[in-house]
Image (cartoon, grey):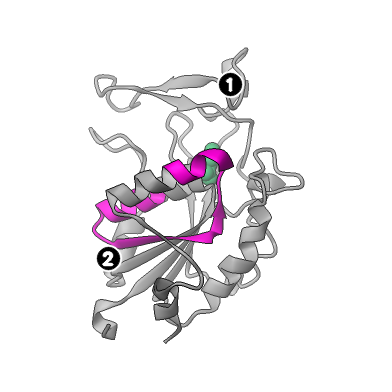
Amino acid sequence: MSTNTFKPALIVVDLQEDFCPPNGSLAVAEGRETVAVVNRLLELPAFVLRVATQDWHPQDHISFASNHAPKKPFVDFATVVNPLNPDEPSYETQLWPDHCVQNTPGAALVPELDPAHRLDEIIKKGTNKDVEMYSAFYDPFTNPRVSDSGLAGKLQAAGVTHVYVVGLAADFCVRCTALDSLKEGFTTYIVEEGTRAVNGAGWPEQMQGLEALGVRVVRMDGPEVALLKS
Ligand code: VGL
Ligand code: ZN
């Protein structure tokens, strides 16, 4: 593949203390095991852009069960209405423990994500208290869109063709980021060893669903990662 048709970007999703054992309020099993893999990817010379995201919620965020007492995290849901247009269809979103509250230790990127100097950009998302934003690109509303991180524009400006997604959690923010990347026209890969799911048992089925939509779940020893080494 010639270099002008292969301009890959790496998106490192929410590798934050609150999503990792041992102390994270929303710790994903083995979440911290992804960091070594992500660091290996960050070193590869081929990436034209390396972006990390941080889930970055205000304390009154709609996704916190604590803001909907007596509802419970992991099991209950809340209705999300487009704050700019109450007539756009609403949807139910899963509730979580308080996590990634702005400027708290839990919101920090994990310190083992050593090559912080290799990141071109850190994008904060989920800052609007009224909307849930799993994707690194934008929230799920379209009429109108409420929050746009500007990521699509940055990838386009850099001439990116292929997007490699890693980080946490596979079944929420990684999944939504990969689907929006695909929607934006990028060939989109999730590197499996670089992610873990909140619901590990459900991940194989989620993975099949993603593949059916066109996202490719690839492995560190596979040809899609080998391409990054030349
Ligand atoms: C995430 C649940 C709530 C994620 C963020 O990063 O996957 N999951 N907020
Ligand atoms: Zn969140």
Q: Residue at x 49, y 40 (%)?
A: 127
Q: Is residue 74 above or below residue 169?
A: above
Q: Residue at x 34, y 51 (%)?
A: 211
The alpha-carbon separation of the residues under discs 1 and 2 comes to 37 Å
Q: What is the quadrant of the C terminus in the image?
A: bottom left
Q: Position of residue 107 (x, y in %)?
A: 63, 47
* 13 relative position to 112: left or right: left
Residue, x 33% and y 37% (percent of image)?
140
What's the residue type where badge 2 is placed? Answer: Gln
Percent from the top left, x then y, of residue 206? Answer: 43, 42
State which region is magenta: 177-205
Which disc is residue 67 wearing? Answer: 1
Is residue 135 at least partly visible in the picture? no
Determine if the C-beta at disc 1 is less than 8 A from ligand 2. no
Which corner quadrant of the image does residue 142 belong to?
A: top left
Looking at the image, the residue that sits furthest to the right is 22
Label 1 element class: helix
Using a 10 Å C-alpha cutoff, classify the residue at mark 1 as few (fewer than 14 neighbours), some (14 to 19) or many (20 or more). some
Q: Which mark is residue 156?
A: 2
Q: Is residue 209 visible?
A: yes
Q: Left or right: 35 with respect to 61?
A: right
Q: Nearer the viewer, residue 151 or 44?
A: 44
Say if the magenta span includes residue 194. yes
Q: Earlier in the sequence, mark 1 or mark 2?
A: 1
Q: Quadrant of the N terminus?
A: bottom left
Residue type pointed to by label 1: Asn
